[in-house]
Image: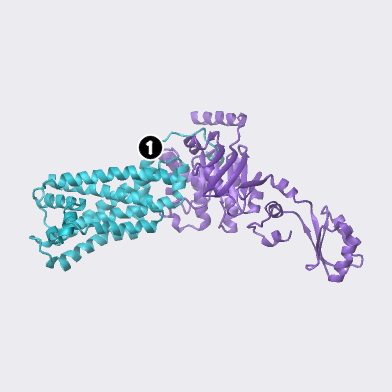
Amino acid sequence: MSDLTLLRPAPGPRPRSRATEATVVTGRCLRLTRRDVDAVLMALSLPVMMMLLFVYLFGGAIATGTRYVTYVVPGVLLLCVGFGAASTAVSVAKDLAGGVIDRFRAMDVHPAAVVNGQVVASLARNAVATVLVMLVAVAIGFRPHAGPGAWLGATGVLALCVLALSWLAATFGVLTRSPDAANGFTFFLSFVTYPSSAFVPVATMPGWLQGFARNQPVTHVIETMRALLLGHPVGDHAAWAVGWSLGVTGVCVIVSSLLFRRRFG
Amino acid sequence: MAYTMMRMAYTVMRMTYTEPAVEVHGLVKRYGDVAVLDGVDLSVARGTVFALLGPNGAGKTTTVNILATLTRADGGTARVAGHDVTSQRRDVRRRIGLTGQFVAVDGQQTGRENLVMAARLCGFGRAEAARRADALLERLDLVEAARRRVSTYSGGMRRRIDVAAGLLGEPEVLFLDEPTTGLDPRSRQQAWDVIGGLADAGTTVVLTTQYLEEADRLAGHIAVLDGGRVVAEGSAAELKARVGERRLDLRLAGPTAYDTVLARLGPRAARADRDGLLLGVPTDGTAAHVRAVLDEVDPGREAVASFVLHTPTLDDAFLALTGRETASTHPREASRV
């Protein structure tokens, strides 16, 4: 085919499915997240450093009834995914502030494909980070007592939680108009992990904080994982954890698409 | 084979089908109390290159964004490639390409990855998308950089990749918003060659520019946009003709010479600048006429120190039409009117 034929207007538009669109855009987001070396290093090193910090510096002073490393691993995993998911806010905000979104819109790519792609990239990023953190945890003495079913359950609960956090972050990314503001969200989201049972038993907190710490979603996710990994009874934490994750995901999917419509018409 | 036949049938159809590629009536866009577009009318014939020329803030980008369905108008109608930009947005989107003011390719993807992605989003299968991306890379002289990340590209290369991405869907109408702003002369020349090639291939191109030279060079038809209105429209030659004919500008040796020559010229002086010692005389630009004028007004051959033959440029037209100077590449030339 000659140059000119290539550039000549084609006979009308070609059909394209939303599925192809989602695949292509998601492929792009995965490629970009893999190549963002700073972000990858940060997402991998921060949780590992936090774990070493808690286990070797603070851990000796915190009485949990078990070895501290046993207690803290689920909390560190959640801190890790919270941090990893929160960066979705920055990726989404960057995509929406740049020229790329205009090109996508002019090509009739559904806006949800971009947000969706970033959420999938977040899931992939967090899967890698979680495996790494788990390996380090085992290396410094974490000994889970879980059968295949429990592992699967813990992985599922964590994955749902990552999905919810990623959508929450993505929604914030659509809401804010600057990547810098979106970056502030990262801080906020990692902070939510602290007033929970992640690092210290809730009973040691002041009374007014205990009610929140005991019932907030992060605690439910952590307690579910703790129970599954250590072979304790799960209680109703699992139902709450799954319910919260699905609920937050659902609300965020709807809110982000409404925000999108308001912002881009 | 079937594809080729469809293509031929389509070409024949296009030739007999005469609805303009872009048709705009009374377009209005307000941001708060400010009317960015205040009743814009445009018509772009199929297969032509059309330039929207205007200073910053004239409403060029707003117009393109409305035509490319990215922004909604507050009033008026616009049809692109035979479809309404508001009620038939999807139909329009599948027939246009857009290269906006800001580079819309990912710095962390290679040039080829960006193009393959765009081709896939245009509905081509994997193999076809790769083939088209490679063909376009070759055409735009980017083969060697194809597998490097775009973040390592020069401004000109980035712009070319960006234009290429807008082309992959083989759009009926291609919008280019300030395609050469910020490019060095060599890159600009390359961009012009590409845009010129598109026009030859039959794509309708709507471009915005602040550079008169660019509009003059590329576009068959130019609309001058100022303050949200079209203040003039026509070919480059027509716009230039509105400013008048050629002029012989004489620089005089001194104030005395100036007064003497001015007296000899009388009402013929089209321009008189005593401080600058400049006098302008209408001329047809032929050597014979210039020689005759010089002999007549300066028989002693001492009064006129030098002369310049002034041909009206689009800058002159622009200044005359908008009362404003442009971002010309030759600011001196523009300020001499």
B279 with respect to B117 (left or right): right
Q: Chain of mark 1?
A: A
Please determine whether, in this image, residue B251 is positioned above or below residue A28: below
Give the mark count: 1
- Give me the residue at 50% from left, 54% from top: B158
Residue B303 visible here: no
Q: Position of residue A149 (x, y in %)?
A: 13, 44
Q: Position of residue A113 (x, y in %)?
A: 37, 43
Q: Position of residue A145 (x, y in %)?
A: 9, 52
Q: Which chain is purple?
A: B
Q: Position of residue B186 (x, y in %)?
A: 59, 57
Figure quadrant of the C terminus of chain A: top left
Is residue B265 or residue A265 the one in the foreground? A265
User: Which colour denotes chain A?
Assistant: cyan
Q: Which corner quadrant of the image does residue B119 belong to?
A: top left
The residue wearing badge 1 is A18
User: Looking at numbered disc 1 in the image, what kind of residue is underneath it?
Assistant: Arg
Is residue A26 or residue B23 the one in the foreground? B23
Is residue B130 or residue A16 the one in the foreground? A16
Residue at disc 1, secondary structure: helix
B165 with respect to A187 (left or right): right
Please determine whether, in this image, residue B333 is positioned above or below residue B138: below
A195 with respect to B14 (left or right): left
Tell me the crowding category of disc 1: few under 14, some 14 to 19, or many 20 or more residues within 10 angstroms, Cα based.
few
- Give me the residue at 25% from left, 49% from top: A162
Q: How is the image coloured?
A: by chain
- Give me the residue at 49% from left, 34% from top: B88
Residue B233 visible here: yes
